[in-house]
Image: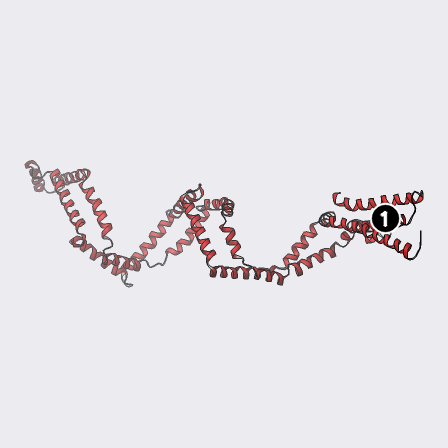
Amino acid sequence: MKKNRLGNLSLALAVCFMTIGLVFKKLHIYEGDLLEILLAGFEAAVVGGVADWFAVRALFQEIPIPYVKRHTNIIVKSREKLSAGIVDLVNNEWLSKDMLRDKIGGMSLARPILEYLMDGDNQTAIQQTLKPELETLLLQLDAPNVVSGLEDLLRPACKGNNIAEPLGRFLKQIVEHKEHYGMLKVFLEVLKEKIADPATLEFLTTEVELQVKNQKKKGSVLKGVLVGAGQILGAIKPSKIAKGIQEQLYELIEEMHESPEDHKIIQALDRQLYDYGDRLTSEDDPAVETINAFGEQFLLRLIDSGMVKQALTRVKEIIHEQVFLGETEHTQLLKDKVNRMLHEFYNDVSKLERTDAWLKSTLLEVIDKHHHRIGELVGESLAKLSNVELVKQIEEKVGEDLQYIRLNGALVGGLVGMLIMVFKIYILDVHS
């Protein structure tokens, strides 16, 4: 494998140069102290390289040498101790409670979250991620279970409410401040147009003719004769009578429209309306109970009529059309509002501090309760690995560094061997 090349190459070179040195010495090609020193160095390099190769291999594999193999394949044989050590190291040293508290206490949690949310690309990604889920949720807004659940919540809320008192106060207020005159004028304007319409005159003429016929048929003989005489003499003309009624109605409505506050009919209606409002604000008046009962029945009938489903369906359609079907002015307005709120929050130091305090206290509470889960997760992850996978992962992470151990073993061994030989030759005067 590629990660083994460095160690293998260093050992191979040491063996090659040792072999060359032995050949030179055996064949007397070259003799001298330099050859002795170099040969001693290469021999030591081979010994150091082989020893370190054995040590590295013993970590990951079993070496089939009697009595020696019991101390090889160390990672596999010691995986329980190794796993326990890793769990202890992570749980009590690297990610201990005190370390996490110190780390969390010295950093801001709210600010990076807001910075992430204010980034346009992140907003687009969040929107694309949440849009299908929110759209699915929205489409369930008028589902039968949602409608029935909401109706069940609304029915008890419709009972026992005192709507008479606020209604009475409302009626008294609009009469006192003449707040209903604007709506009344609009109504009277529409009524004037309807009365002046030819179709109204035609309707009144038909009604007058019908009344004349009824008087002739159902009245006394004398009344019938008089009505008939009036028709013959032209005194009773349904079209003329209907025209007169139309004109009088038009004049009456016009008078009320021009000055409603001064008209006797409006004044009388206002007094009646105010008196009724005053009655509704009195607890003992029978009208209170009547209005409350009517309001309760009216609301319950609205619920039973399917109003809740219709309202939810309409709301669903409006939101779906304005928010989920492409970019609209409403979605842009919503984005602008959200961004404005985020920037205001980001620039408010007191809000950031309060949010930070809440996030930190919540996170520390979670850590206190579930800190042991960190070690458990590490232990579970290690337990899922087979021996082969465990060895492979460790070797992939540290294999290259272990090859430098083999290289260093060969180099250091060679240097030490040469130093020993120099010491033997030049200090002790000992020759091989």
Locate residue 176, reporting x and y percent. Answer: 23, 58
Where residue 223 sits, quadrant-wise, is top left
In the displayed structure, does residue 401 sit left or right of residue 297?
right
Q: Amino acid at mark 1?
A: Phe
**Residue at screen point 84% across, 54% down:** 416
Horizontal arrangement in the rendering, residue 392 relative to residue 300 (left or right): right
Using the image as rendered, state which of residue 29 and residue 172 is in the foreground.
29
Quarter of the image for residue 203 reads: top left
Of the 4 image quadrants, the one containing the N terminus is: top right
Report x, y in % for residue 72: 81, 52
Q: Residue 8, image x and y in percent?
A: 80, 45
Pick the front one: 342 or 72: 342
Q: Which residue is tagged 1?
A: 42
Residue 69 is at least partly visible in this image: no
Q: Is residue 378 left or right of residue 55?
A: left
Considering every residue shown, the one lying at the far left of the view is 233
Identify whether 272 is placed above or below 219.
below
Specify the color scheme.
secondary structure
